Each structure stands twice: as structure tokens, then as C-alpha cells.
Image: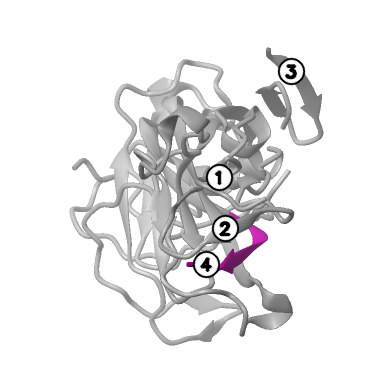
Amino acid sequence: MLKPAATSMTATVALAVALVPAAHADGPTVGSDGCRGSMLSVTVCAADNSGSSGSSGSSGGTPAAAAPAATGGESEAPTDKCSYDRVDPPPPAGHQAWRGHDPADGSVYKVVCDSDRGGVVFLPNGQNAPAAPTIDPELVARRAAASMRLEPPKVASPRAAGTYVVGMPMWMWATPSPSTFGPVSASATAGGVTVTATAKVTRVRWAMGDGTTVTCRGPGTPYRQSRGKAMSPDCGHLYERPSYEQPGGRFQGTATATWTVTWTAPALNDGGTLTETRTTPFTAAVHEVQVVN
């Protein structure tokens, strides 16, 4: 890792820019992209694309030792420990990351701090003291993700009007679309950093209302009468007791989709992932079959 001048640097880093950031025949039963621009140079590309963003990360470096920082002439307790990595290859001349400087006069560094803050900063040749980063690419990624339309699963089975049988396989599935399963793409630019993000659902967690959960890696397979009493190949459940004693005589369940947002900032050779969740409630009336001799 290359650092400006001194091999160990001390910094209290303050970001100069803050960006806000199931069986329909549900198992056996009884009875194009368009693009639009918006403010802050956000571009969304998908058939339908709004949400906020979740968690997780970008790369780090070796932190330097912390030291008291001066603010308004008063000494404060040690705060962040940050490391500086020179961006290599550097951004092209004229890129906003240079802040109007000539590339021959210094270098652009990516800053990573223990608090997970960071960004990019220009440092002149020979400068020992670090400067405050101007932008955090992950925050730009959150802005891109916030411009996307990420909706909860559209549950097709179990159906509210359906009646299901104890001990008989139930097939769960959701109807996929760009806004409910992706992929959805968006880009945002701020402070000289352009981030491209792509979101798609990576799993759906079905809480069945009987104390069990089923995690499916896709929308599930729609049931067909030809499948008879077979279990779903990828997203099924079998209720072992009826729902008579449940509120309204139905199991109260939820289908929660996890959206994984993968982002890249090519000019900084940086990237990471964020996660979002969206939930849809459902109910299932489960009865016992009465056998008459």
C-alpha cells in the first residue's frame, strides 16, 4: 500500500460531503429497459425502478495510529484511524477527483477509516498531513440504490382464497418482475465519484405461520395439476396441523425478499455490496380431511 510521504500518518477524518445515503393448485387443495435522470446526477436504468439501502461494504487498508485532533483550537480525544491508498491507475486528467489539480502535482488517494467512513482526496507531492476526503463511494452507491424501485414479493401462492390440507405438499411461489426480483440498475455521481449499482433478489424467506421458515433461492415453481402430490422442487412446505386455532382460522405468514445491491466505482477501483429487504404478508387456511366410512 502506498501512502503519502510518511509511512505512518495520523488523521481525524470528517467527510466534507454527506449524502443521505404457494400452492394454487398450490399443491393439492380442497374445493426494457428505460432510463431516466434525476437530481444529483442519478440515472436509473430498468423497466421499472425506489427504496433505501442496507448494509455492508468496501475495501480497507492498514490503519495509522490515532492522535488527538484539534477543532476550533481545542484538543479532543482520539477519534478515527484512517489509511490512505493511492488510486492506481489514477483517474484520467480532468477527472473531478483531481479537484482541478494537475496530475503531475500529486496523487489521488482512497481513504478508509475504522469507522467505515472514507472517500477520495488529492494530496500534493511531498505533503505529510492528510486532508479530509471529499466523498464516500458507498454513500454514492446508497444514493443510486435509493433511486431504484425495489418492491416486496408478489405472492401467488398460498392464495388468500385457497384452502389447504394437513399433510399435503404446499407449493409457494411469487410472480417475478423487474421491480420484485430484478435485476434493476442505477448510477449516481457526486464529488467526482460515479457509482453503478445493480440489485436483484437473492433469496426469499417464507415464515409459514406455524413456527417454521423456508428459504428459497428464487421465486419458486408454480404448481401444475400434473405434479399430483409431489413436493415443490425448490420452494415447498408441509403443514402438520390445521389452522383452526389461529387468528381468523388461518396461519399468518410473511414472504421476505432480500435484495442484494452490487456496486462498483471504476475510477477508484472500488466496489462492494448493500442489502435491502422487502416483506409481503400472506394467510393460509389449512384443514384436516374428514374421512367417512
Disc 3 and disc 2: Cα gap in Å? Answer: 43 Å
Task: Tell me residue 231's x, y (percent).
Answer: 36, 45
3 or 2: tag closer to the N-terminus: 3
Query: Magenta stretch?
Result: 278-293
4 or 1: tag closer to the N-terminus: 1
From the viewer's perspective, is 58 left or right of 70? left
Compared with 72, 165 (above or below) is above
Q: Is residue 185 magenta?
A: no
Tell me which colouring the rendered structure shows: one colour
Instruction: Identify the element where label 3 is drawn.
Output: strand
Task: Tell me residue 97's x, y (percent).
Answer: 52, 31
Question: At 32% from the left edge and 49% from the top edge, which residue is drawn?
Answer: 84
- Give the camera-side residue of 271 and 247: 247
From the viewer's perspective, is 241 left or right of 180? left
Disc 2 and disc 4: Cα gap in Å? Answer: 19 Å
Disc 1 and disc 3: Cα gap in Å? Answer: 37 Å
Judging by the rendered image, the residue that carries numbered circle 3 is 35
For label 3, the crowd category at 10 Å Cα-Cα, with few meaning under 14, some 14 to 19 and many 20 or more, is some
Amino acid beneath label 4: Val
Judging by the rendered image, the residue that carries numbered circle 4 is 292
> Contact, CB < 8 Å: mark 3 with mark 4?
no
2 or 1: tag closer to the N-terminus: 1
Give me the disc on residue 26: 1
3 or 4: tag closer to the N-terminus: 3
For label 2, the crowd category at 10 Å Cα-Cα, with few meaning under 14, some 14 to 19 and many 20 or more, is many
Disc 3 and disc 4: Cα gap in Å? Answer: 62 Å
Mark closer to the observer (3, 4): 4
Compared with 74, 265 (above or below) is above
Amino acid beneath label 2: Tyr
